[in-house]
Amino acid sequence: MTQEFWYLSRAAGFTAYLLLFVSVALGIGVGTRLGDRIAKRNTIFDLHRFTTILALAFTLFHVYILLLDGFFNFSVWQLSLPFLSPYRRWQTAVGVFAMYAFALIVISFYVRRFIGYRAWRAIHFVTFAMFAGVALHGITAGTDTAEPWAKLIYVATGAATLALILYRIQHHVPATATVRTVRLAAGIAAVSVVSLLFLSTGLLSDGGAPANATANSGGAGARPFLGAFTDGLTGSYTQTRDTSGTQLVITGTVAGDVAARLRIELAQSATSAQQQPVVTRNVVELRDETTDVVLCTGALTALQNGVMRATCEGSGPYSGVRISIASSLQTDNAGTISGTIDGTMARLG
């Protein structure tokens, strides 16, 4: 199983976010001295409108390309309505609300002559809340948040947007001594608020692991919360049949981001031709390759035609995390297996 649609969604999400940042920056710059030095107001406004529309297009692609993803099997309603997604429910809901706000702002460009300038301007103030919501959605729901380049994007765009807002405010206020003091206090307060938001979301923490990642770790230490990963899998299998039924044991080594040992035990009772076999044992276990600490335990959800799927609950360094894996396996008559293992991690609760 591949995750090309998941990768496309992630790439489109970051593209939409960066386009939104450019749109917000252009919108703030319209009518300021800095903006007038760079280009004519009409040119900046046209670019602002174009980047907003383009950002919405990438947002829609980011959302609805997931209809083709076979891992979560999202429905249109799960992607379109808040709190229905099986993946990080409230974090995804924030993104859904932001998507609707995004659509409202784009529509306002085309109804401006009917609603008047004041109403149109009032609607545009929603952009700031929407940008904050999109950033929150990306930080808390994104599977790349722990990556250094993703942290740099969020910190840089957030700081730049805050600086532009402060510049726009001071642009319309006379430079008296009292006002300068208020500006300094507002700047310090704004920086403090943004810093607290970044710290509360774990954006600046190392690895992005769950808060309880070190609990009951048995000395393994914290492991990074990966969101999504694709690793190599090699190992062996044994399958036996006797009067009690069929037993399958798969043992393998996962090499890559997770670096673990995989063990699967599946047993089915012997039945007559008229009966369906009964699964008597179904265990999936991942253990740390070096410390032998259990990373997660669960069960197979599918095993057919070389495609294996399983879900397990994290423990030790992954306590509080659900890990879903899918693998496409190749086998031979010597009892060896090889292939890739694709997975996603989701924090419980």
Image: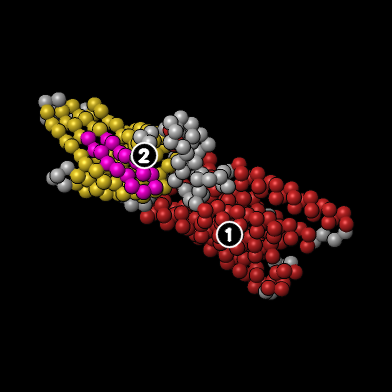
For label 1, the crowd category at 10 Å Cα-Cα, with few meaning under 14, some 14 to 19 and many 20 or more, is: many
The residue under the point 37% across, 33% down is 294
The residue under the point 87% across, 54% down is 178
Front residue (pair 221, 231): 221
Where in the figure is residue 116, as x and y percent of width and height? Answer: 70, 61
Where in the figure is residue 324, as x and y percent of width and height? Answer: 37, 40
Q: Is residue 257 left or right of residue 125?
A: left
Circles 2 and 1: CB distance less than 8 Å?
Answer: no
Where in the figure is residue 153, as x and y percent of width and height? Answer: 56, 56
Residue at mark 1: 20
Q: Element type at marker 2?
A: loop
The residue under the point 46% across, 43% down is 224
For label 2, the crowd category at 10 Å Cα-Cα, with few meaning under 14, some 14 to 19 and many 20 or more, is: few
Where in the figure is residue 146, as x and y percent of width and height? Answer: 50, 48
> Is residue 302 positioned above or below 269 on the image?
below
> Is residue 233 positioned above or below 22 on the image?
above
Q: Nearer the viewer, mark 2 or mark 1?
A: 2
> Is residue 329 positioned above or below 53 on the image?
above
Quarter of image, res 311? top left
Residue at mark 2: 290
Q: What amino acid is at disc 1?
A: Leu
Residue 306 showing in the rendered view: no
Q: Is residue 266 magenta?
A: no
Q: Is residue 253 left or right of residue 115?
A: left
Q: Which residues are magenta?
A: 249-264
Front residue (pair 345, 293): 293
Q: Return the disc, 2 or 1, that comes first in the chain's sequence.
A: 1
Secondary structure, magenta segment, majority class: strand
Q: Is residue 267 left or right of residue 260?
A: left
The residue under the point 47% across, 39% down is 222
> Is residue 239 positioned above or below 56 on the image?
above
Quarter of image, res 237? top left
